[in-house]
Amino acid sequence: MKLKYFNIIFLLIFFVGCNDFNEIKNDVISISERSLLINNKKYFIKGICYHPVPKGSTERSFENIDIDLSLMVDAGINTVRVYEPIDDVKILDKIEQAGLKIIIGFGYDQNGYYDILSGTYIDYVEKYKNHNSILFWELGNEYNYHPEWFENDIINWYTALNNTAGKIQEIDKSKPVSTAHGEIPDNLAISSLDNIDVWGLNIYRWDNPSPVFDEWKSISSKPMYLSEAGSDSYMTIERLGYSKGENQLAQADANSKILNAVFKNSNIVSGVLVFQFTDGLWKSGNPEKQDIGGWAPNSIGVPYDGSPNEEFWGIVDIDRKKKKSFDVIKEKFNNN
């Protein structure tokens, strides 16, 4: 009995004597050649892109975070990717408690909300750099498709991106810095972005991203993950045996083949984030209902109709009802 009390007192003294409690409990995130490591073990991203906007709204909300995390755990998802920072420690805590990691994305010009242009991203990194849920920081989302946002000179974006990555590395030496680049980067991007530790690639090449991995291997030795990949559940035309209209089978078949290619090339790619968790009724037309249409740049490679119907990309619908693709992802993520 006395020994038990002594052990408790010793542990209390140990914790109180540490300057930063986070240093005790936090996972150690590192890079080894082409791999991400957590606590010196290879970490393969089995992820989902997550921007939950409720029906009838155009703003992100975490009102369904508990059910969402439960569904993600069921599907074998270990990582979520968000397109703007989550400034709520309670939500970050829930993600950590569910056993998931999060990739925090910073935009360039988000009206001063933790963005790159205003420099307020620094405030966020300083505030949350010790939160154990955060896997790494991600800058931008396929901005290479939009030189018009940077005075029609993409080098302006690359310069801001590289400088921002360097600044984050000064503030937080515990996590890598990434960018989500549209497709394989060209020589200009690779040579301009030496501060990027890990590359995310948004890839839409029908149902087979396999060539991407050899292409990446030939241009870089850094880790790479697919920051977006997948398919929507609406066919604008009848094609390849898939009927026109809402077609969950087409989405499920495409995602199955995409994930097979990813896992087959796990020696080169460090994981994938399927786009996306829930249907986005806010994207095209009336946010109260699911509209057909919507277009994204450079996305003609979306299976199986070449048309990215923006409101049909979820693996669950807006009411959290599982689509056929959910079961596919669950099988692939839990068995690889």
Image (tube, rainbow, N blue to C red):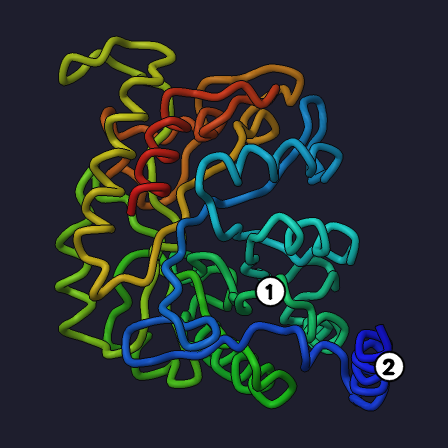
- x, y percent for residue 249: 29, 18
> Looking at the image, can residue 156 be seen?
no
In the displayed structure, does residue 161 sit left or right of residue 36?
right
N-term-proximal mark, 1 vs 2:
2
Q: How dense is the environment of label 2, judged by Cα within 10 Å: few (below 14), some, or many (20 and up)? A: few
The answer to which of 184 and 218 lies nearer the viewer is 218
The answer to which of 181 and 129 lies nearer the viewer is 129
Q: Amino acid at mark 1?
A: Ile
| Residue for badge 2 | 9
C-beta proximity under 8 Å, tags 1 and 2: no
Q: Secondary structure under badge 1?
A: strand
In the displayed structure, does residue 297 sit left or right of residue 265?
right
The answer to which of 47 and 211 lies nearer the viewer is 47
> Looking at the image, can residue 4 be seen?
yes
- x, y percent for residue 76: 44, 42
In the displayed structure, does residue 288 sit left or right of residue 221?
right
Residue found at x 49% / y 45%: 49
| Residue for badge 1 | 134
Q: Determine whether 203 is above or below 268 in the image.
A: above
**Disc number placed over residue 176 in the picture, else none:** none
Between the residue at mark 1 and the residue at mark 2, the CA separation in whole angstroms equals: 31 Å
Residue found at x 74% / y 64%: 112
Q: Determine whether 91 is above or below 1 in the image.
A: above
Q: Determine whether 108 is above or below 70 in the image.
A: below
Q: Amino acid at mark 2?
A: Ile
The answer to which of 232 and 73 lies nearer the viewer is 73
Kindly give the residue lying farthest to the front in the view shown: 1
Query: Of the residues tagged 1 and 2, which is closer to the observer?
Result: 2
- x, y percent for residue 218: 13, 73
Q: Secondary structure under badge 2?
A: helix
- x, y percent for residue 58: 69, 33
